[in-house]
């Protein structure tokens, strides 16, 4: 058999351990699609390239291995850009492949030609065009190495149609995979950090996405327990310390102050563990820029006037935490106001659980979602007011089990993302929590999930509006406009796709319906009316709390 460039490319993908490629074919990459069909890799045919890009992103997010998405040239490739940008801003490994016009016409105005390499450059870590079949082994290896190495992100490769359709030297082989290993922390940096810690009165840990990604939970828990230091997480770091750990004090990142801010008000030293500035503005926890900062991560920190680092420890995160814990004696323990934060959150959630009002309060939906899912099950939370409620209130017990986009904060990722998480983690239940706005941005993927027999449940928080924008307008302008819309009948819509459809008509129905839907082996859609009048009450309440301090 003669080797073609397309089969060589697929062999290189197999060599990287790729199990799924998400995408839509086009005229210019039919040989690649055929070569994939003949391989061990499962090609998941989607209904929108944007959705395919979110699938690849969320696959990368939960596995740590680059998710792969494929599209045709021009419009198909351009449709990939939202998930690609989301992956880069969310530190998630992704490899995007698209076709491109051939070398015979890429120097002039020609049908469907757009300079894709330049279009992808600012939203990727590397954007390049494959110049020849001979370059495929090196370029695929380089793409995965860059995408998966800290800080992970997206990579884009354009495959011109003449190369896609051409032959390859049969002697060409995929290159062996190698993964850069993290260094042990430098003893001098550990000692400098230990000195800062010894002199701090109320140190606090801020655990970010890097802690979740780098499996630092065990070391983080040991560190917190040994030194008696409270741990807050960012939205992306949720679960890096289980929320029922006595040293977990909650998630920071809500638009206003929250209970967890008590810890940051009091502290003189923030130990940032795997924190990335794109997740959350450091000004929010260090407004005057005067707090001392120890930074622990695999790569140097971004520069920000509110993030002036006293000691940076670059290397393996768990090893760094263990070395630091070893070097310091425990201090006095948590101050009372800090210790009170988890209890206040738990009260709020409990209150929500018992609230039978209809439409449901946001806290009721969060409480029932938590009860319906197991500790290791996964919820993907789309962007909107629901994200604020879920991020601050949803107790999370393991990293990457409450997935939020807070780098780009895009709408529309959760439903397609859930499909990929369900494929990547087939033994977990997977729920996409979405607003009615975000749901209609990528609902076509219900067809993909039904056709491909990928189990998932979608919970729509229905308020017939772009709720978060309404909340922001009400808060800052005192009124709102241009945020309301109407919805289709979600139950009929679900049925028309061959999915199960449920409509919640009383608060008591939500938990049993969630349980029933999650127990199904198929696709189910639940529409749950939500009363967002609680939004303004929450910001007012937290505002008063602010004043009381
Ligand atoms: C792709 C995209 N478009 C617009 C926005 C701005 N935006 C953020 S939240 C939001 C409203 C979300 O509405 P919905 O999905 O119904 O959720 P809700 O806020 O009502 O809970 C909008 C328009 C965004 N983040 N992403």
Image: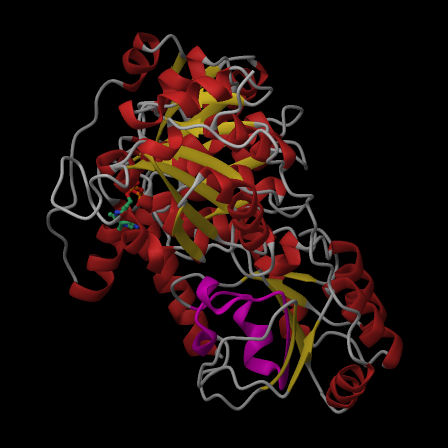
Q: Is residue 299 left or right of residue 543?
A: right
Q: Which residue is nearer to you in this view: 103 or 128? A: 103
User: Where in the figure is residue 320, as x and y percent of width and height?
Assistant: 77, 70
Q: Judge whether 512 appears above or below 171 on screen.
A: above
- Position of 112 with respect to 36 (left or right) is left
Q: Residue 246: image x %, image y %?
A: 75, 59
Question: Considering depth in this image, is 278 or 481 the residue closer to the camera?
Answer: 278
Q: Is residue 269 magenta?
A: yes
Q: Is there any visible trace of residue 433 in the rendered image? A: no
In percent of width and height, residue 311 lies at 66, 85
Q: Quadrant of residue 15?
A: top right
- The colour scheme applied to this rendered structure is secondary structure
Which quarter of the rendered picture does the N terminus lie within? top right
Residue depicted at x 79% and y 55%: 218
Q: Is residue 546 magenta?
A: no
223 w.r.t. 115: above or below = below
Which residues are drawn in magenta? 257-284
Image height of 303 relative to 58, above or below: below
Q: Residue at x 35, y 25 (%)?
A: 24
Report the side of 160 relative to 514 (left or right).
Answer: left
The residue depicted at 65 percent of the width and 43 percent of the height is 175
Residue 514 spot, x, y in % from top left: 51, 23
Toward which corner of the image does residue 233 lie, by quadrant? Answer: bottom right
């Amino acid at each position: 058999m003669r080797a073609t460039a397309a089969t060589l490319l697929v062999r290189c993908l197999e060599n990287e351990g790729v199990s799924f490629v998400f995408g839509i074919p086009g005229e210019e990459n039919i040989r690649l699609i055929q070569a994939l069909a003949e391989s061990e890799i499962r090609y998941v045919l989607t209904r929108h390239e944007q959705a395919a890009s979110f699938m690849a992103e969320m696959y990368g997010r939960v596995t740590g291995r680059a998710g792969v998405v494929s599209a045709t040239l021009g419009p198909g490739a351009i449709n990939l850009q939202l998930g690609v940008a989301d992956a880069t801003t969310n530190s998630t490994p992704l490899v995007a492949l698209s076709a491109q016009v051939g070398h015979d016409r890429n120097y002039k105005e020609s049908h469907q030609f757009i300079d894709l390499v330049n279009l992808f450059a600012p939203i990727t870590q590397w954007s390049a065009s494959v110049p020849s079949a001979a370059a495929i082994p090196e370029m695929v290896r380089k793409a995965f190495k860059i995408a998966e190495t800290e800080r992970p992100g997206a990579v884009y490769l354009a495959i011109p149609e003449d190369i896609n359709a051409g032959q390859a030297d049969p002697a060409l082989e995929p290159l062996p995979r190698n993964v850069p290993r993290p260094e042990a922390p430098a003893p001098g940096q550990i000692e400098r950090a230990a000195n800062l810690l010894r002199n701090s009165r109320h140190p606090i840990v801020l655990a970010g996405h890097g802690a979740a990604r780098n499996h630092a939970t065990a070391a983080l828990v040991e560190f917190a327990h040994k030194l008696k230091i409270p741990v807050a997480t960012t939205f992306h770091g949720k679960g890096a310390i289980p929320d029922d750990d006595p040293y977990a004090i909650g998630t920071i990142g809500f638009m206003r102050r929250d209970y967890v801010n008590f810890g940051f008000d009091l502290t003189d030293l923030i130990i940032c563990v795997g924190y990335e500035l794109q997740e959350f503005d450091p000004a929010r926890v260090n407004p005057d820029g005067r707090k001392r900062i120890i930074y622990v991560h695999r790569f140097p920190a971004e520069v920000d006037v509110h993030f002036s680092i006293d000691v940076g420890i670059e290397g393996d995160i768990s090893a760094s935490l263990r070395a630091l814990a070893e070097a310091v004696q425990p201090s006095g323990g948590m101050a009372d106001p800090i210790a009170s934060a988890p209890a206040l959150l738990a009260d709020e959630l409990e209150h929500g659980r018992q609230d039978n009002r209809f439409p449901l309060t946001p806290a009721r939906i969060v409480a029932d979602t938590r009860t319906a899912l197991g500790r290791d099950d996964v919820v993907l939370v789309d962007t909107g007011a629901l994200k604020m409620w879920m991020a601050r209130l949803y107790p999370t017990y393991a990293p990457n089990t409450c997935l939020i986009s807070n780098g780009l904060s895009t709408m529309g990722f959760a439903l397609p993302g859930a499909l990929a998480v369900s494929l990547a983690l087939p033994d977990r239940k997977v729920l996409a929590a979405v607003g009615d706005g975000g749901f209609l941005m990528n609902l076509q993927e219900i067809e993909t999930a039904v056709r491909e027999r990928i189990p998932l449940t979608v919970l729509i928080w229905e308020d017939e509006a772009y709720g978060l924008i309404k909340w922001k307008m009400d808060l800052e302008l005192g009124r709102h406009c241009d945020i309301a819309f109407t919805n289709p009948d979600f139950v009929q819509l679900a049925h028309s796709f061959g999915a199960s459809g449920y409509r919640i008509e009383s608060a008591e129905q939500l938990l049993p319906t969630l349980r029933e839907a999650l127990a199904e082996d198929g696709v189910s859609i639940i529409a749950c009316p939500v009363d967002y009048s609680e939004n303004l009450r929450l910001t007012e309440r937290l505002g008063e709390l602010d004043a009381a301090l």
